[in-house]
Each structure stands twice: as structure tokens, then as C-alpha cells.
Amino acid sequence: MDTYLRHMKPGSTYRLTNFFGSKTKKVYRVADPDVTIAFSWKSVLSDLTDTSAWFPEDRFRFHGYEQFEAACDLKGDLYDFIGHIKLVNEQALNESFVLDEVEIASDRRILVHVQTHDGPVMKLYIWDKVATAFCEKFRSLGKPPSVIMVTTVNPKRLGGALSLSSLSSSRVFFDTDVHQTREYLAWLESNSEVANRVNAEIVTKAETATIGELLTYMKQEGAKVAWFECTATIDDVVRGSAWYYIACGGCKTKATKGPTTLMCRKCGKTEITGAAEYLSKLSVYDNNDHASFVLLGDAGFELTGKKASVLVESYYEANEGSGDDHVVPVPQVLIDTIGQKRTFVIKISKHNLEGKTQALTVTKVLPLEVPALGYDLAADVVVSPTADEGVKRGADMIVSDDAKRAKSG
């Protein structure tokens, strides 16, 4: 490739001598032709400036859901996919979205939920070097793309659902890279209502599990990072330690202190505006099981109805003599949630599976169901255990670094 590719130009015709010729393999075939030509170290490539030779246009071979379903796990031809992005690594895209390239390098893959026009949503797994190329292209755009095209994907059934998986031969294209992505982007912009009929929450609806089932899943051999819905009663809120952290105002990653400003390792910015985000520890229970939940980011707002940044600023306004190193006490709105029975979306992380922590991360808290008229609320009132029992149940939770007051960088 290093020898020949730099001399070749799209649309030009060449004569090749001294090459290998073979029948195209039937397993994982990437193109229509029956014959494969391979360069050798003796190959000679010469440019033909005047030739009447004609070659059929090399076209992408796009498939939709039904065609991929029919070809699933057959190890036959590998076709191309084009569609619009619903999620990247379980997150919806917005202007402030930033890829976690450290996590991607560790997992060696990216999970993209994709959809063609108004068809079913599929999972697209992008692996290894193709994932690296995805990150480089994504970063170079300056903003999240809407359309993705991936060549030679392998349809496989993972966890009972149809998924598409990249191979070493796969290539990734975004919004305006080629004619086909530009054409699809134009359709997407003109048919946004059709494209958005399926929202992100439906795409990632989590499986329901009890606390006991979550703890059992974490111990299973071969268990992977996963999301579950768990209904539990809040037993206590752990106090005496920081209940929030200072985050990058853009990507919400924990900010780091520079010489004179706050910095973000994920965004790569050396000067950011910090904002307080929830990192609160809850002791919860259901049936005969109890666990430690860590309330993270927007999940805290969904539980309390108050943003962490507003609560922190309000505290400092009411306590002007407090220094930046002062630990803000747990706010009353969090303490008032004790006794509530709520449904939490829980992420089983790599730290849980590796046994580094038993505390489970809450990424979302579902709204309370409004009881019907005439419903007996007293029947569902739960009396909180004693303070000593609550502290004992919360003792195994993660302890974060002391949170500091947000500053503008």
C-alpha cells in the first residue's frame, strides 16, 4: 500500500503486471466480483493516459434491516450500511457531546444506535482500528455528526437482537464525506419528523431488575456493562462527605485544577467554567436486599427537582463567610427524599464487574407516577429506619474527593 497507493488517483486507469489472481472467497465476501487481484512485491503499475477500456462503476452495497436480518450469522457477503445516529455509547448527541476516548481505547469498541429512514433501530459495534478512525473523524468535525455510513459490516445476533459489527475492512464516513452521506443528510433535514419518531429513551429502555438480581448479575462470569431499571425505597442519604463535584460546564466531566483556572481533560481545554453536579450517596432497599446507589449528574435533578449548581450557590450566598474549601452540607431537598419509593436506571460499570466497588451508579430517576383519585396513599408510606441503621447501610458507598466551590475559569 505504501508503495503503490500514493501514485494512484481516483478515476485514472492503470496497467498492472506481475500480480496474484484468485477466486473471491465465499465467506465474508466484501464485493460483487468473483475474482480478486492482489499486488505482489514484483508488481509494476503504469498509468494509461489513452485507453478505451471501460469498467463498471464500483457501487456501495447498502442493506436495510430486513436484508440484514435475512443474512444474519450466515457468514456470507458483507454489505454496507447508511443511516442516522440515535446514540453513541448510550448517549444522545448534542452540541456539547464529547467522546470518552480513554474509555473507548480501554473497551476497544464504540456502540452506535443507528436507524435507516423510519426502519427499526439497530446496534452498530465499531471495533479496534475502525473505532480509532471513528474517533479521529468525529473529533475533526468539530460537532457531532448526524449521518453515518460504514462499509462491509457483519450482521450478527448478540443478546437475541440483530446487531451490525465492523471488520478490519470496514470504513467509516460521516455527513458530507461522500455523495451518499450528503444525499442522506439532505433527506434527514427534510424529514426530521419521520427520523425522530423513535426517541432515545425507547432505544435504550433498560431491563427491569431487583437489587438482588443486580448483585447476582455483577457476580456472573462473562457479565458486561449494562443498564437496568430498579425500583427501590430510599433508606438514607449519606452525610458528612461531599455530595457534589465540580464539573466541566460542557461535557460534565470532573474538572481539574490548573495553576489559575479549571481544566477539562476530556475536552482538552485549559480554561473552563465549572458547575456543580450531583455525586450523592444513597442507601436503598427492596424486599430483603439493600444496596448503595450513587446519584450522578442530571439524575440528582430528576430526584429532587433542584439543580446542584443552584443549591451550592444558594448556600454560599446565605453563608458569605464560608471559604472555597468549605464542605457544603447535604441539602434538605435530598434529605426529604428519604422514604420515597422510586424507579432508578442503574449502570453496572466495569468497576462493579471487577469487584472494585459494590456501589451502583444511578444515571436516571424516572418520574413519580401520579396516583389515581381515591387512592390510599397511607398504604404506601414507608417509615425510614433509624439513623444508625441508615449510616451502617451506607458505609460501603464510594467516597468522592472533597468538592470545591465552582469557579469561572
Image: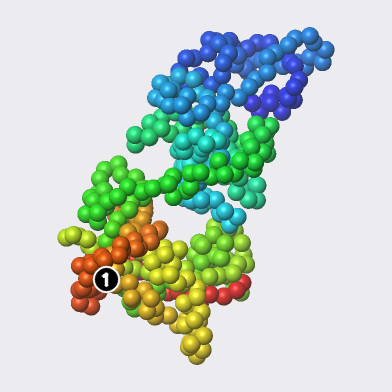
The reply to whether residue 240 is in sight is yes
- Residue 328 rendering spot, x and y as whole percentages: 43, 80
Q: Is residue 382 left or right of residue 37?
A: left
Q: Which image quarter: residue 183?
A: top right
Q: Residue at (24%, 56%) from the top-left corner?
A: 211
Judge whether 166 appears above or below 298 on screen.
above
Q: Nearer the viewer, residue 224 or 47?
A: 224
Judge whether 84 appears above or below 332 on screen.
above
Q: Which image quarter: residue 347?
A: bottom left
Image quarter of the N terminus:
top right
Identify the residue under disc 1.
339
- Residue 284 rendering spot, x and y as whole percentages: 26, 65
- Residue 38 rendering spot, x and y as whole percentages: 60, 16
Q: Residue at (44%, 50%) from the top-left corner?
A: 201
Please name the amino acid that badge 1 sits on. Gly
Name, please, the residue furthest toward the left. Answer: 288
Judge whether 30 appears above or below 135 on screen.
above
- Residue 132 rendering spot, x and y as whole percentages: 55, 41
Q: Residue at (75%, 16%) from the top-left corner?
A: 13
